[in-house]
Amino acid sequence: MLKKSDWLKQIQTWLTGAKKNGFTMQKVDIANEEYLLRNVNNKDIRELLRIERELYEGETPWNRTAFLYELNAPYPRLYLAVEKSSELVGFIGCRFKNDNGHITNFAVRKSYQKKGIGTHLLNKIKKYAEQNHCVTLSLEVRKSNMDAQRLYRRFGFVTIAIKKNYYNDTKEDAISMQCQIKEQRD
């Protein structure tokens, strides 16, 4: 049976989605603008869904349950949010297994795109993956999302496969991409 203090900590962790990942909140300068970079928590889900609706014409590729699962799953992961004046403007999520990091979700509000926020988030995830001894970083991207594909290629991602009818909402194909972070260990 859990002690009351352990039970309260467990409840707090579930409510906030806070798991120890070694990342601490920080102010960051992106293209001469100050932002707050922090861990995503369960309280952010409404804003994450709002960003998805904005980007996917009213649709949400992920629902509340999917975000809750990802933020509270037992495997290692890092979900980061960028805020400007207390408004969540972008986020990225990555899970880690063995020596691979897999970017699960990544979005920046339309009005904040092409301002370096996506680049900053990808840099943070790539650096975190490297520090945690990942060899590769992978993701899927919609075949129609050419802007995202260009960004990923700038980071060294290459196409490794096409996944037919991957996205449930539109049945669009996904391009599976991967980048090498470190040389394969012997």
Image (cartoon, rainbow, N blue to C red):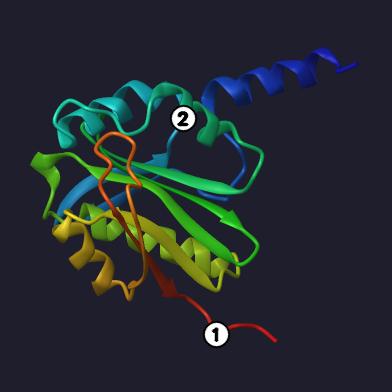
Q: CA distance from mark 1 to mark 2?
A: 33 Å
Q: In which quarter of the view is residue 60 placed?
A: top left
SS under mark 1: loop
Q: Residue at x 28, y 42 (%)?
A: 171
Residue 86 numbered tag: none
Q: Amino acid at mark 2?
A: Ala
Residue 79 in the figure: left or right of residue 108: right
Q: Is residue 158 left or right of residue 99?
A: left
Asked whether, in this view, residue 59 is left or right of residue 185, the answer is left
Residue 172 falls left or right of residue 122? left
Secondary structure state at the residue bearing disc 2: helix
Crowd tier of the residue under label 1, counting other residues whose Cα lies within 10 Å: few below 14, some 14–19, many 20 or above: few
Quarter of the N terminus within the rendering: top right
Q: Nearer the viewer, residue 57 or 184?
A: 57
Looking at the rendered image, the quarter that the C terminus falls into is: bottom right
Q: Position of residue 72 (x, y in %)?
A: 58, 32
Residue 8 rendering spot, x and y as whole percentages = 71, 16
Residue 172, how many percent across, how many down? 25, 47
Q: Pointers 1 and 2 in contact (CB under 8 A)?
A: no
Residue 183 is labelled as 1
Which of these two is toward me, 105 or 91?
Answer: 105
Name the residue rendered at 66%, 39% in the picture: 74
Choose between 4 and 134: the one closer to the eye.
134
**Above or below: residue 175 compared with residue 59:** below
Pointer 2: what residue?
A: 66
Which amino acid, by three-letter code, is at mark 1? Glu
Quarter residue 2 falls in: top right
Image coordinates of residue 98 in percent, x first then y, are 65, 62
The residue positioned 37% from the left and 32% from the top of the image is 62
